[in-house]
C-alpha cells in the first residue's frame, strides 16, 4: 500500500491525488455536444501542469453529460439498468480523457470496475499503483461497478484504495458555501469543515457515503473551482484554495 507523503517533492503538499470531475464539465449545452473537444483539451492541460510538478494523478469522471441513472429512473428506466448505463457513460468519458491527455504528452491508462478488456484494463489496485510509479495518470471508470452508488462514492473508494493524499472535488464554485451563492448573496464560504459537520449539514457537494468513506480513511476532501487559473497548482503547493473537509476542520 502507498504510504502518504513518501516520494513527493518537498515543495508539494500532496504527492498523490484523486481528482473528481463531473461529466457535465465536458459537455457544451450551446452546441449540444456531450463531449466538447475544447473543454476536454482545457482539462487535459490542467492535469498536465500538476503532472509535470511530480504529482501522481488519479481521475474519476462522472457520466452526467451522457446519461445519469437517477434521471433515467425518473423517466421510466429501471434504476439498476439506468445506473449501468451511467457507468458505461463514465467509460466513454474516461477514454476521451485518456486520448486528450496523450495528445498533450501525458501517458494515461483507463481502468474500469467492469470487465471490458478490449478497451480498458480491469481495476486492480496493485496495477494502478504500478502505473503511478511509471508516471502515468490513471483514469478510474465504471463507478464502483455496482448500482445505487454515485461517482462521488467511486472517487472516495478509489482514493482510499490508492492511498491518495487528498480527494479533490472540482466544481464551478470556489468552495462550499452556507447556501447556493448564485441564489443567495448572503451565502458565506467555509474555509474548512470537519467531516461530521459536512454530514450533519447534509451538504450536497458530495453524497454522504463519499464523505463517510473519506472520514473513515482520513482522506481530506478539497472542493475548489477547477476553472480558476492556477488553483490546482496552488493547491499542490499547500496554498489555501477552496474549502477543505478533514478531521480537524
Image (cartoon, rainbow, N blue to C red):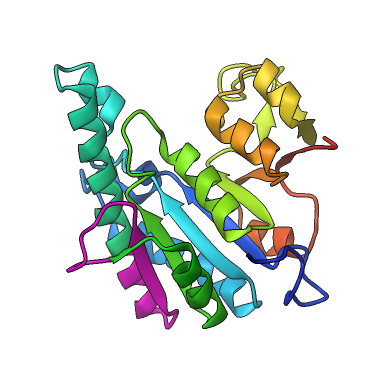
In the rendering, at what x and y percent does residue 183 appear?
56, 18
- Position of residue 61 measured from the top left corner of the image (x, y, whole percent): 40, 50
Q: Is 107 included in the stretch rendered in magenta?
A: yes
Within the magenta stretch, is there residue 60?
no
Magenta residues (range): 97-120
State the residue at coordinates (80%, 50%): 240
- The part of the image, by quadrant, that contains residue 181 is top right
x and y, in percent, of residue 166 in the image: 67, 53
Give me the residue at 60% from left, 37% from top: 213
Q: Nearer the viewer, residue 203 or 162?
A: 162
Pick the residue in front: 105 or 194: 194
- Residue 150 falls left or right of residue 91: right
Q: Which residue is at the front of the view, 240 or 17?
A: 17
The C terminus sits in image quarter:
top right
Q: Residue furthest left?
A: 76
Question: Taking 227 as reference, is 116 left or right?
Answer: left
Q: Residue 66 lies in what quarter of the image? A: top left
Disc count in the image? 0
Amino acid at each position: 500500500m502507498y504510504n502518504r507523503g513518501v516520494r513527493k517533492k518537498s515543495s508539494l503538499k500532496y504527492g498523490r491525488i484523486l481528482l473528481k470531475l463531473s461529466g457535465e464539465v465536458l459537455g457544451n449545452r450551446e452546441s449540444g455536444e456531450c463531449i466538447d473537444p475544447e473543454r476536454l483539451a482545457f482539462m487535459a492541460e490542467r492535469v498536465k501542469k500538476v503532472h509535470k510538478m511530480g504529482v501522481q494523478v488519479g481521475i474519476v469522471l462522472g457520466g452526467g453529460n451522457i446519461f445519469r441513472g437517477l434521471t433515467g429512473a425518473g423517466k421510466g428506466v429501471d434504476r439498476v439498468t439506468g445506473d449501468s448505463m451511467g457507468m458505461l457513460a463514465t467509460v466513454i468519458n474516461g477514454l476521451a480523457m485518456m486520448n486528450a491527455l496523450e495528445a498533450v504528452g501525458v501517458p494515461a491508462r483507463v481502468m474500469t470496475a467492469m470487465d471490458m478488456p478490449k478497451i480498458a484494463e480491469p481495476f486492480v489496485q496493485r496495477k494502478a499503483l504500478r502505473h503511478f510509479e511509471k508516471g502515468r495518470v490513471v483514469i478510474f471508470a465504471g463507478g464502483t461497478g455496482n448500482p445505487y452508488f454515485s461517482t462521488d462514492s467511486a472517487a472516495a473508494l478509489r482514493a482510499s484504495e490508492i492511498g491518495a493524499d487528498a480527494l479533490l472535488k472540482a466544481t464551478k464554485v470556489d468552495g462550499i458555501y452556507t447556501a447556493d451563492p448564485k441564489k443567495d448573496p448572503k451565502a458565506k464560504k467555509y474555509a474548512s469543515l470537519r467531516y461530521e459537520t459536512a454530514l450533519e449539514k447534509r451538504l450536497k457537494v458530495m453524497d454522504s457515503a463519499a464523505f463517510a468513506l473519506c472520514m473513515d480513511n482520513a482522506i481530506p476532501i478539497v472542493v475548489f473551482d477547477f476553472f480558476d487559473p492556477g488553483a490546482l497548482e496552488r493547491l499542490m503547493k499547500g496554498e489555501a484554495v477552496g474549502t477543505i473537509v478533514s478531521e480537524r476542520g
